[in-house]
Image: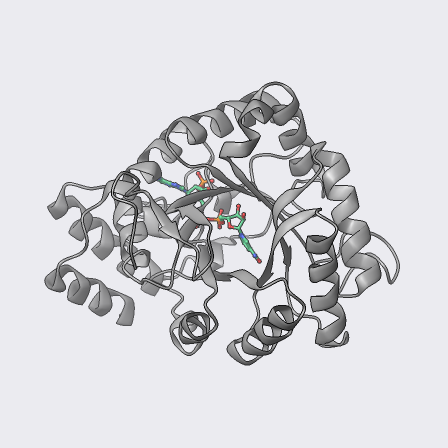
């Protein structure tokens, strides 16, 4: 992979023309209703640090839709002056509304959802529109044609998929190529504790020329050392969202997280930065997509854009930690 010499913090997204920052910011948590001031500060801090890619979905909040509304307000109050310097993505695929047209992979749902996302964010277009998860009940041809329509209509510049398995990814990429809207990117869960993408997905991306963006790269905070000494009261696991339940913080995961923290300390880095550098060791990964609950976390993660590659010894230590 070649990187522009003056932009070491960017990587080419697969074999497309688009560069993405190696660290991107997701708005799944902490950008919902009642968080405007903090959300605004986080968005601007990210931009200042070179994290120019903001990832949303129709259902991010809570409540669903409110993260896009918050981001729309942030854009309208100044950030939109930088519209040509930032990448905004959104998605549809999880339940968003009542009835049969508020969920799934139909043309009806995807295109109406994208229109609603654009209204909430007060945008004419998003850079990337994803199908958020596969829908086996809808023909893949229909879902891919809907993504290609969004591109043809200028409402999205690029098409993406998320949570698709390797076989479905290859099929989707072939269809999108035929439709003239090549698959730009696949968004998948990947971290030291979740290695599934190494079993075929990363290879499928290399074969199709699509880029990859890894979500939950810190295992929702676990690999950042957030739970090394218990569950902090202000952490995701202590919140009522249910996305990271205390019982998911197993002794095995904690042991891996503590080893990662020790290896990071030897390098003079924070655990989050090492966990991100570990993900970015793979050339198929264009960007690591973090979440954050405060400015310090964003600053810390942004520093991973400059992290030195891991040594063979560090890689081995982390492999052993993950194996348990
Ligand atoms: N496509 C999909 O299906 C899908 C699914 C999930 C997520 N996503 C995307 O991926 C994004 C990121 O997901 P995620 O929030 O699970 O990512 P993550 O980066 O693994 O976890 C984020 C959490 O880790 C903690 N953290 C972050 N930086 C830290 C640091 N430097 N030091 C200590 N703790 C730190 C914070 O926990 P506390 O909140 O406890 O402080 C933060 O909320 C989402 O916003 C969304 O855009 C996509």
Q: State the image coordinates of residue 96 (x, y, percent, origin top left).
A: 77, 52
* Left or right placement of residue 29 versus residue 121 in this view: left
Residue 290 higher or lower than 134, as above or below? above
Closest to the observer, 138 or 295 = 138
Residue at 34%, 52% (x, y): give it.
Answer: 223
Quadrant that contains the N terminus: bottom left
Q: State the image coordinates of residue 221 (x, y, percent, origin top left).
A: 40, 47
Q: State the image coordinates of residue 253 (x, y, percent, origin top left).
A: 35, 61
Residue at 64%, 59% (x, y): give it.
Answer: 132
Residue 151 higher or lower than 34, as above or below? below
Q: State the image coordinates of residue 316 (x, y, percent, origin top left).
A: 16, 67
* Left or right placement of residue 200 versus residue 303 in this view: right
* Left or right placement of residue 324 versus residue 84 in this view: left
Quadrant that contains the C terminus: bottom left
Residue at 74%, 48% (x, y): give it.
Answer: 114
Residue 81 higher or lower than 87, as above or below? above
The image quadrant that residue 319 belongs to is bottom left
| Outermost residue toward the bottom in this view | 167
The image quadrant that residue 310 belongs to is bottom left
* Left or right placement of residue 311 versus residue 55 in this view: left
Task: State the colouring used for the structure image.
Answer: one colour
Residue at 57%, 70% (x, y): give it.
Answer: 164
How many numbered discs, if any? 0
Closest to the observer, 158 or 24 = 158
């Amino acid at each position: 992979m070649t990187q522009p010499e003056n932009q070491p913090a960017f990587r080419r997204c697969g074999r497309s023309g688009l560069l993405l920052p190696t660290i991107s910011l997701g708005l799944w948590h902490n950008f919902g209703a009642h968080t405007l001031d903090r959300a605004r500060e986080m968005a601007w801090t990210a931009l200042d640090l070179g994290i120019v890619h903001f990832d949303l979905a129709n259902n991010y909040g809570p409540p669903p839709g409110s993260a896009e509304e918050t981001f729309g307000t942030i854009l309208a109050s100044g950030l939109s002056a930088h519209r040509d310097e930032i990448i905004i993505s959104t998605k549809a695929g999880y339940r968003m509304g009542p009835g049969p047209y508020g969920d799934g992979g139909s043309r009806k749902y995807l295109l109406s959802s994208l229109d609603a996302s654009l209204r909430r964010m007060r945008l004419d277009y998003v850079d990337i529109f994803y199908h958020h998860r596969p829908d086996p009940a809808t023909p893949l041809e229909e879902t891919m044609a809907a993504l290609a329509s969004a591109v043809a209509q200028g409402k999205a510049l690029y098409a993406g998929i998320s949570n698709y398995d390797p076989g479905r990814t290859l099929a989707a990429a072939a269809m999108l190529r035929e439709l003239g809207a090549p698959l730009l990117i696949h968004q998948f869960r990947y971290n030291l504790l979740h290695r599934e993408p190494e079993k075929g997905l990363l290879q499928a991306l290399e074969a199709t020329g699509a880029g990859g963006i890894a979500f939950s790269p810190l295992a929702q905070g676990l690999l950042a050392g957030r739970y090394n000494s218990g569950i902090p009261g202000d952490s995701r696991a202590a919140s009522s969202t249910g996305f990271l339940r205390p019982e998911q913080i197993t002794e095995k995961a904690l042991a891996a997280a503590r080893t990662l923290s020790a290896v990071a300390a030897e390098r003079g880095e924070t655990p989050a930065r090492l966990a991100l550098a570990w993900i970015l060791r793979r050339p198929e990964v264009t960007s690591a997509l973090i979440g954050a609950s405060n400015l310090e976390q964003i600053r810390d993660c942004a520093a991973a854009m400059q992290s030195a590659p891991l040594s063979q010894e560090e890689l081995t230590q982390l492999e052993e930690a993950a194996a348990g």
